[in-house]
Image (tube, rainbow, N blue to C red):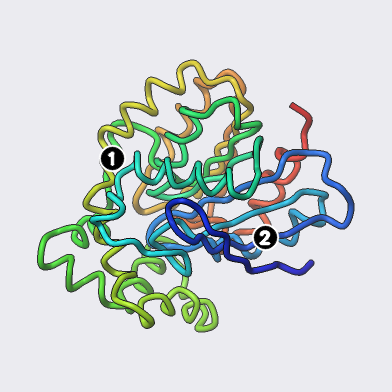
Amino acid sequence: MAVDEKIITTPSGDWFYREVHPPNPPTAPPVVFLHGLPSLGYSWSALLPDLASQGLQGVAPDWLGFGRSHKPQKRDFAYTPDAFIEALDGFLNAMELDRISLVIQGFLGSVGLQYALRNRDRIDRLAILNAPLSPTAKLPWKLKQMSFPLVGDMMTQDPLLIDRTLEAGSGFVIPDEDLDVYRRPWLKTSDSGRSLLYTLQNLELKTAMAEIASGFESWTQPTQVIWGMVDPWLAPEPAQTFAQHLENGEFVSLPEAAHYPQEHWSEEVAKSLLPFLRRSS
C-alpha cells in the first residue's frame, strides 16, 4: 500500500504529512498519528500500510517545527503547548478531519493529550504509546540537557545527537536508511535545531501533567495504552494505573519494546492497535 507524501498550508504554516487511503471507503474515522521527541512522522511508516489494508485512512504529520514542516521563528510561534494545540487544530481543519482517532507517542505526546482533552467531541478513539502520563514524569537527561542555554544551542545543532537519542530510547541501532531521514532536516537548516530547542524549553511538562491528571478523570472515549516495558525514560507502572482508572481503558504491554515501539516493534503494536481502531464506538 503506497504512502503518499504531501504538504498542506495552514494558518500557522505549511505542514508536511504522510497519508494512506484504503482501497474502499473507510467505515471508521481517519487516524492521526503524532510523533514524539526528537522523532518525526516517519516513525509511523511501518504501520501506515497495515492501517490502509484494514480499511482505515491514516495521516502522520511532522509537527510544526519538525522534519519537513514549516519551522517558524520564535517571534512568530511560541512553541508552547497552547501554540502547538492551536497549530494542530489548524492542521486538522485544513485537512477537513472533523472526527478522528488520535494516536500519540513520546514527550510531545503530552500536547496531543491536552488537545484531546480540549477537543473531546472531535476524538473517537485514543491510543497512547510511551508518553508521559503522571505528575512524576520528567524529561530524560538526554533531552533535558538540550534545553539548557548555550549548551542546548550547540547540542541541538548536531545531527548525530538525534541518532544517539533515538537509539538510546529504543535500544536499537537504527539502520542508515532511516537515520538519513531523521538527519536530513538538521543537515538542511539550523532552524531544525532551534525548533527542537524552543520546544524543549517551553514544553511546560509539569503543568501539562496536572491538566492530564485532572482531565482524564472524566474521559469516556475508548482508550488503549500500549507500552514498551523496557522504556529507559518512562516507567510502566504510572501508565498501567492511568489505563486502569479510565472508564473505557485498556493496557497492552510489549515486554521487549522500549520508548519508540511503533518503529522497532511495529508488528506487535499493529496486532493490538488495528483491531482497536476498527471497533465501532
Which residue is at the far left? 150
Question: Residue 122 at x, y = what percent?
Answer: 60, 31
Mark 1 neighbour class, 10 Å CA radius: few under 14, some 14 to 19, many 20 or more: many
Q: Is residue 270 left or right of residue 93?
A: right
Relative depth, front residue between 88 and 214: 88
Image spot of residue 211 (x, y percent): 35, 27
Q: Residue at x 34, y 78 (%)?
A: 189
Residue 116 left/right relative to 149: right
Q: Amino acid at mark 2?
A: Glu
Kindly indicate whether the residue at mark 1 contacts the one at mark 2 (C-beta within 8 angstroms). no
- Residue at the (35%, 39%) spot, across then down: 82
Quadrant position of residue 125? top right
Question: Can you say whether 17 is above or below 138 in the image?
Answer: below
What element does badge 1 sit on?
A: helix
Residue annotated with mark 2: 19
Disc 2 or 1, which lies upstream in sequence? 2
Residue with the most extreme right position: 24
Q: Residue 264, percent across and down?
A: 56, 64
Q: Quadrant of the C terminus?
A: top right
Mark 2 Cα-neighbour bin, 10 Å: few <14, some 14–19, many ≥20: many
Q: Which of the two discs, 2 and 1, sits closer to the camera?
A: 2
- Compute the Cα span from label 2 to label 1: 29 Å
The answer to whether residue 30 is above or below residue 159 is above
Instruction: Give the residue type at disc 1.
Output: Leu
Q: Based on the displayed image, in which of its 4 quarters is residue 253 positioned?
A: top right
The residue labelled by disc 1 is: 205
